[in-house]
Image (tube, rainbow, N blue to C red):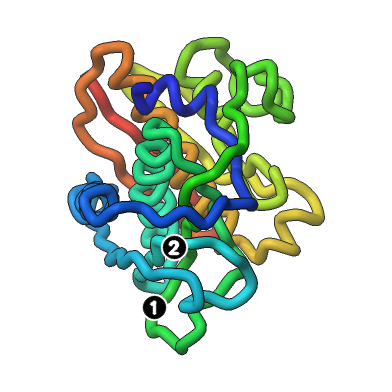
């Protein structure tokens, strides 16, 4: 399964069978995290820890992300970690983003994590299996990028984004919705925008486009990410 196909088949998995992954598989997942492309001007650090190293969730493995405490850094973490999420699901493994879980030991600059492992949960059959907003509520255009972003996972299924399309440019803007925007305190919503950007990039690449830059921009209280391609 390709990353593009995984977007339309993925499922957030919260029950794992506990069967351990072999050393080669874990090394491959760590390599995906280490080599994931970042947004322009951003950086993040990732590590894989095992069960017992995290409070608030039971899973065999977790990919922990660390970054600065600002919107551009949060979006970048979502963007990079989403590539790992799609990679895991493309290999038949289960995964789920955890916004509220914390490392058992206090960690500086911890942002968010991805739980993963073997799971018997079935994949989705296609876009129709997703409970998401109508396409028109997130995009003024009906195209493969919009459909890819529509199925992106988000905290509380809040889908905090709006898409705009220009000349070889896709803009993913932060659009917090109602009470969820308050409850998620913006941080998780901004991580979600980064996840949506990964889905947009994978759709563009599937269409043969070359990504030139993925640039986060924060101006006053507005946040957006511009994806330039050719």
Q: Residue drawn at (54%, 61%), measured in percent from left and top? A: 59
Q: Secondary structure at mark 2?
A: strand
Q: Residue at x 71, y 50 (%)?
A: 156
Residue 3: quadrant of the picture: top left
The quadrant the N terminus occupies is top left
- In the drawing, does residue 26 fall left or right of residue 7? left
> Which mark is on residue 62?
2
State left or right for residue 67 relative to residue 38.
right
Say which of 153 and 212 sits in front: 153
Between residue 39 and residue 34, name the one nearer to us: 34
Q: Position of residue 101 (x, y in %)?
A: 59, 70
Nearer the observer, 159 or 124: 124
Which residue is depicted at the point 61% across and 37% down?
121
Q: Residue furthest bottom?
A: 106
Label 1 neighbourhood size at 10 Å, few (<14), some (14-19), many (20+)?
few
Q: Is residue 67 left or right of residue 142?
A: left
Q: Which mark is residue 109?
A: 1
Q: Nearer the viewer, mark 2 or mark 1?
A: 2
Asked which quadrant contains residue 100, the reply is bottom right
Residue 9, horizontal then vertical, whole percent:
54, 25
Instruction: Report how many numbered discs are placed on residues in the image.
Output: 2
Name the element at disc 1: loop
Query: Percent x, y for residue 129?
Result: 69, 22
């Amino acid at each position: 399964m390709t990353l593009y196909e995984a977007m339309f088949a993925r499922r957030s998995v919260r029950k794992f069978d506990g069967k351990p992954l072999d050393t080669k598989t874990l090394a491959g997942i760590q390599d995906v995290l280490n080599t994931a492309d970042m947004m322009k001007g951003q950086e993040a650090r990732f590590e894989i820890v095992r069960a017992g190293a995290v409070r608030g969730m039971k899973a065999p493995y977790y990919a922990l992300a660390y970054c600065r405490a600002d919107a551009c850094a949060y979006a970048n973490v979502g963007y990079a970690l989403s590539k790992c999420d799609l990679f895991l699901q493309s290999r038949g493994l289960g995964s789920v983003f955890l916004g509220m879980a914390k490392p058992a030991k206090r960690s500086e600059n911890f942002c968010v994590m991805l739980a993963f492992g073997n799971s018997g949960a079935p994949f989705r059959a296609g876009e129709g299996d997703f409970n998401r907003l109508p396409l028109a509520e997130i995009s003024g255009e009906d195209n493969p990028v919009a459909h890819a972003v529509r199925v992106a996972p988000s905290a509380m299924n809040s889908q905090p984004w709006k898409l705009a399309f220009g000349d070889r440019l896709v803009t993913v803007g932060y659009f917090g919705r109602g009470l969820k925007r308050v409850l998620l305190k913006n941080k998780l919503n901004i991580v979600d925008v980064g996840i949506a950007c990964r889905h947009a990039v994978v759709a563009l690449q599937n269409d043969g486009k070359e990504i030139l830059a993925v640039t986060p921009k924060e101006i006053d209280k507005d946040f957006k990410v511009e994806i330039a391609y050719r």
